[in-house]
Amino acid sequence: MGIAKYTEDDIKSLEWREHIRTRPGMYIGKLGDGSAFDDGIYVLLKEVMDNSIDEFMMGAGKKIDVALQDGAVTIRDYGRGIPLGKVVDVVSKMNTGGKYDSEAFKKSIGLNGVGTKAVNALSISFKVTAYRDGQSKSAEFEKGQLTKESKLVKSNEPNGTFVEFRPDDTIFKKYHFVHEYVDRMLWNYAFLNTGLTLTLNGQTYRSDNGLRDLLEKNISGETLYPVMHLKGEDIEIAMTHSNEHFSEEYYSYVNGQYTTQGGTHLAAYREAVVKTVREFFKKEFDPTDIRKSIIAAISIKVQEPVFESQTKTKLGSNEVVPGGQSIRAFVGEFIKEQLDNYLHKNPDVAQIILQKIQTNERERKDLAGIQKLARERAKKASLHNRKLRDCRVHLDENKNARRLETTLFICEGDSASGSITKTRDVNTQAVFSLKGKPLNCFGLGKKVVYENEEFNLLQAALNIEEGLDDLRYNNVVIATDADVDGMHIRLLLLTFFLQFFPDLVKNGHVYILQTPLFRVRNKKETAYCYSEEERRAAIAKLGPKPEITRFKGLGEISPDEFKHFIGKDIRLEPVLIDQRASIQELLGYYMGKNTPERQEFIIDNLRVEKDLEEQLAK
């Protein structure tokens, strides 16, 4: 093979907006259509919100108004307002902003002057207006290109900044904002900024108790003791132990940024809790026995945080201030003092924690032998050949950089998994094949995960035995048939995840694959329809007598057709759990003993299926 030419003509220089639009993933992570909480449209919203939050943190403005309508976003804060002479530069000139001056923006989220420029470049329309001391100035853009700039005009508006943008639908194809994701984002801002009032389309978000409110809103089911709330300068922690969870659950933040992948501060917290508890009880408990079932939130403020990517999901720095105390020492000393004091002042809570640790210890020892056998069985089962068709990204040296792209499809039967396997992207998409219906594990202990072959192999494939830190696939997609059996398998899998690994669902990793219910075609055109409404529209478009096929199982869809449904136009329905709902009560309703309410639910849903069949027969 000859060596490709490499000349001066191959060297290109892109202006800022062209570079962002050519490589958007460098600035906002994955794109997506809004189905996932970490899709790009939410990063765009967050980047603008972060600037408004920074104003509040600097003592300027106590209210932020947000509106979502028809795919457009507007955000109005009441901070200091962008200096009027720099309105255009701040949103369109790279390496320009106020965050480089640590006095103007101490402990800010954004430090690189990139966020709003990325929003501007990736929006079909972008408008910014600054109100400052009785004057205002506006600028409008299209795909980052300045189209209109106003002169300074008098204004009666209070100081602050107004931003309106509409994501570019050629980049974020068929995007939509999921209310639950935006709702969660605004609640997080409220919990982390006590005294701040936010509104979303008229709904108000406000917290007076910070992280204690956050935990109490997010905890499902019973806790062993009331939420412990510890506060200091630049650090706040809330924690308790769940009476229902089998794993650890954390919410971690740096300067108000939700660090979903944790980082230095969370690692320091986990270590410090173990050390403090050991010293308090004067016994070398196993760390897993201490932390099992912990639910905690930690927030710290750092003057110049260093994150591992532009999307700021993991803290990498280890200094509170340049040349100052390390984050590990800062968090460790705070926990040692405050947690130790709390346990001494609340001996009843200390006794509950001791009993929980001892229970965890007994359960761990009882499981030890079973776990060892289960791991050996997983190896002997030739996991990567028999049950799992893995993706190549895990062999890539840059696998962490591509983690957000990875997907595992969980299929029922060989025909469905075979179709997906033949058409998937082998680099980022993996397939796990179920054999029959999984066990209903509602009410069973963790022991069943290791004794049941399906669960053991699925747990091993996902690599979630010790939590989500090393989760191998960012998206876990349940791909079952759109019939009664398929719905039952979905429920059984969701029961497994919610019973033993609720964080997988709560952190937005689990989805349902949407595949078409109908194929409507004539000799010239084929339409795939996901609902009865789409079917009627396709019939009207293609003529009175097209061929109509009702897909009842994934195995009926050929590999050539399947490539349309798991490629760039994939439709995923996120599995969302009401934060106020008890997971055990939820599972008890769907998977426990039959009740009149559940029987009525099943009958109503079967009636919908029956009505659909009758309509098709006409």
Image: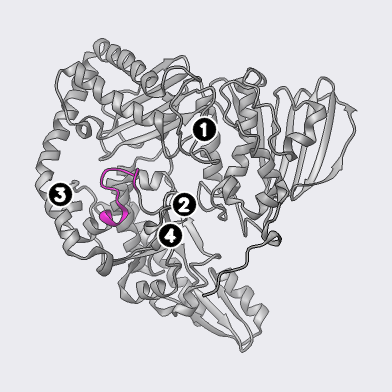
Question: In the rendered image, which residue does mark 2 sit on?
Answer: 404
Counting from the top left corner in percent of width and height, residue 545 is at 61, 87
Query: Which type of secondary structure does the marked residue at label 2 adopt?
Result: helix
Q: Earlier in the sequence, mark 1 or mark 4?
A: 1
Instruction: Indicate yes or no whether the magenta region holds residue 389.
Output: no
CA distance separating discs 1 and 3: 37 Å
From the viewer's perspective, is 467 left or right of 607? left
Q: Amino acid at mark 2?
A: Leu
Report the front residue among 175 and 254. Answer: 254
CA distance separating discs 4 and 2: 17 Å
Q: Residues within 10 Å of mark 3 (few under 14, many from 20)?
A: some
Most extreme residue toward the bottom, as rendered?
523
* Residue range of the region highlighted in magenta in the rendering: 459-470
From the viewer's perspective, is 570 left or right of 90? left
Q: Mark 1 near mark 3, Cβ–Cβ under 8 Å? A: no
Which mark is drawn over residue 371?
3
